[in-house]
Amino acid sequence: MPRDTGDTLEVSIWRGGQDGAYQSYSVPSRDSQTVLDVVTYVQRYIDPTLTYRFACRVGMCGSCAMTVNGRPRWTCRTHVSKVSKGGNLKIAPLSNLPVIKDLAADMRPFFEKWQEAKGVFEPTKTRHDPVEAIRPNEPARVAADEGIECINCGVCYAGCDTVRWNADYLGPAALNRAWTLMNDRRDSGQSQRLAAISTDGGCHACHSHQSCQEFCPQSLNPTGSIAQLKRLATKAYLRGEIGS
Amino acid sequence: MTIERTRTDILVLGSGGAGLFAALHAHDHGHGNTVTIATKGLLGKCGCTRMVQGGYNVALHNGDSIERHFMDTIEGGKWLPDQELAWTLVSKAPERVRELENEVGCFFDRNADGSLHGKAFAGQTFDRTVHKGDLTGIEIINRLMEQIWKRQNIRKLEEHRALALVPTSAGDALAGVLMMDVRTGRLHFVQARAVLLATGGGPTMYRYHTPSGDKSMDGLAMALRAGLPLRDMEMVQFHPTGLLAGPDTRMTGTVLEEGLRGAGGHLLDGAMRRFMADYDPRAERATRDIVSRSIYAEMKAGRTSPNGGVYIQMSHLGPDKVRKQFKGMVDRCRDSGFDLAGGLVEVVPTAHYFMGGIVCRADTSTELPGLFVAGEDASGMHGANRLGGNGVANSTVFGGIAGDEMPRWIAANGGYRAPDEAVLALEAERCLHPFRNAPGNVHALRERLMEVMWDHVGVIRDANGLSRGLAELDAIEAELLRTGVADDDRAFNLTWHDWMNLRSLVETSRIIALAAQRRENSRGAHFRSDFPEPGAFETSTFTMIRKRDDALQITDEPVRFTHVRPGQTLIEPVLAAE
């Protein structure tokens, strides 16, 4: 058995589906231990039926996000000492998404909204054309780059109050992606995207609570992107380019 | 257990660079064929393309050439690559990068004038590696998965595990794939006219490894059982510096980038002594394979840090400077409780990439009609060593080719084929095997496998160790077959999947050990302390292993120098003089 510090973590983990309940486990505390390691310990040594999801282990895939002591986080990159409250951990699946089982949430609604926000590149050129020369310091490119390193982990979506209150709201990640595309001059889907993000569940639904910005493990600022989208949408409306 | 049955014209297994590209091409240029993509985890989130940090090798820049990229690939592969495959890789890469930029929507880093930036990468004679910062894989996969989600006609089976390639009764073609819906634990047979195997390799049978946790060599284990020939199976690439965070940590084994050593980082043994100069005059800046072997030798000699590795030290370069230059790495270490900028971090060599795989043709077809292969499951592009930046080029180039080729093949070769019901029943029973035994400790066996492979089939090998390793593998397999899993809930039962993962890993581990035993020289990633010389390049052979009537056959196949012979080059003299 691996070395431990002699202390014990009291870990409460969500078991079952939407109507499940918390169960408690005692896990030895270690110097080097992430929340994912704690969950793994429970599956390996205490209850082999525990379900959770992870893949890359280093914060690149966004598969292992869960709610840890009330806040959505990547579990692979969260050291226990950063979040444990007096040796207590409460771990649940991501909020605002259906529960599949235990700690695994269904990410489909998140990706469906990504598509509803037209979060996909619409090409103007083909593989037979040269790569377009775009200076990295062009203002639009700088704006796109600021939001581009999203790994679609769903942390912002799970932490967003507006998503909780309004099931139609597209959410921070999808709108942030839409904003990066509005700044991509190679893209041909601008007017349809602007229409898509101007609907009831679009950018105007955001109340700027800024939880997304606070929770984003990549330090992105979806609230800022959404504010820019609001400005674009309002201008387009005033010009009569999109409906109300 | 009942097996549900469904049909699709084209079935793609895997959602890394190869799988996503294949689905995209098969959908867009597939003449109305139905396309299904199945993946063990979430679409685009599992697998290793996403984890690519370095970038994408492509001869697109002024002064570079396809021939130069080709020669770098062949020489890097120590003259073992299949030259047709390597040529296809380098000559198709420019089109694929333009497709990624212009059609898929990736945006790679630019020079100040707006042209594509090419960075220097080890083992290459030109700065040709196109990248997006050090998160190139995320940019490629995010944009590809958006395109796949957009195409609603592509059927997506997430958290679906492939269990077996099921042939026809005559065994003359593939009929389809037995799969499991991980979320329910139910089996279903997907009959398909053409199947792409793109599940990714990933040598996770070593105590220290970099690939994502879902990887367990299922593709190669399935191919082996289906009788397909596997080549270069001794070729496991180790990265010299994986993070060592102690037992039972998922983060152990993940890569600390090579740039740390390039920038002047020091490697220290357990007694805080720099040791690399004992092995190579370039010290820490020696090539990946030499640094890996040197650290491994230090570990074998017992001169280790508390967790059994060595230390990397950056602080002498100035913590603030390190923090700025290697922000991603410093943050990652900090999140696991280590101070890379100012302190010492324990590191170990870590199994990174698998050059071995299924023998295939340049159009991704295999010996089994109806089965195509791309990405890390395929073999022959890299020979004895893969260049950094050729991995993502390989998966995307050949994934796209497979997506073009499968509809053509279907048009020429007709309809659905009936599966061999006996094989189907046998394979279904195979995955239910652990429910027949009393529950045991699957994880302890996995640890034992990782120890055996690390100690006996690892960075430095010899005849004695390999025989011992093979005997141990037999013992582990026998014990695994006696070890059960509780049958109380089959839905999303990770421990059941751990059992199946381990079985795939044991089967492929045996092939690695046998191939390593067979190759009595040292080439690229394969090093034999009892045969340290590379042997004559002119008479190079590669190992090939297949299963026939339950016996493993191993042969040495001559490398065919179809484009260039050892000692020659394709690079024009005027360029070579630069």
Image (spheres, rainbow, N blue to C red):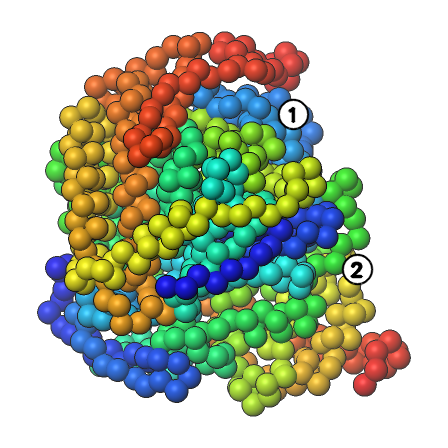
Q: Residue at x 13, y 73 (%)?
A: A7
Q: Position of residue B193 (x, y in %)?
A: 60, 46
Q: Is residue A187 visible?
A: yes
* Residue at 76% in and 54% down: A123
Q: Is residue B517 left or right of residue B354?
A: left
- Determine the residue located farthest toward the right in the rendered image: A240
For the C terminus of chain A, give its image quadrant. bottom right
Front-most of B314 and A216? A216
Residue drawn where x is 68% and y is 51% of the image = B33
Q: Element at badge 1?
A: loop
Could you tell me residue A147's position as x and y percent? 60, 64
Please name the residue that numbered disc 2 is placed on: A188
Quarter of the image for residue A232 reads bottom right
Image quarter (top left, top right, bottom left or bottom right) of the N terminus of chain A: bottom left
Q: In the rendered structure, the residue with mark 2 lies on which chain?
A: A
Q: Which residue is mark 1?
A: B65
Please name whichever residue, A137 or B148, is drawn nearer the observer in this view of the structure.
Answer: B148
Quarter of the rendering containing residue B331? bottom left
Res. B46 in view: no
Which residue is at 35% across, 50% downward?
Answer: B426
Q: Nearer the viewer, residue B551 or A73?
A: B551
Left or right position of A28 against B28? left
Can you say whether B89 is above or below B493 in the image?
A: above
Amino acid type assigned to the residue bearing label 1 in the image: Ser
Amino acid bearing label 2: Ser
Position of residue A36 in the picture relative to residue B413 (left or right): left
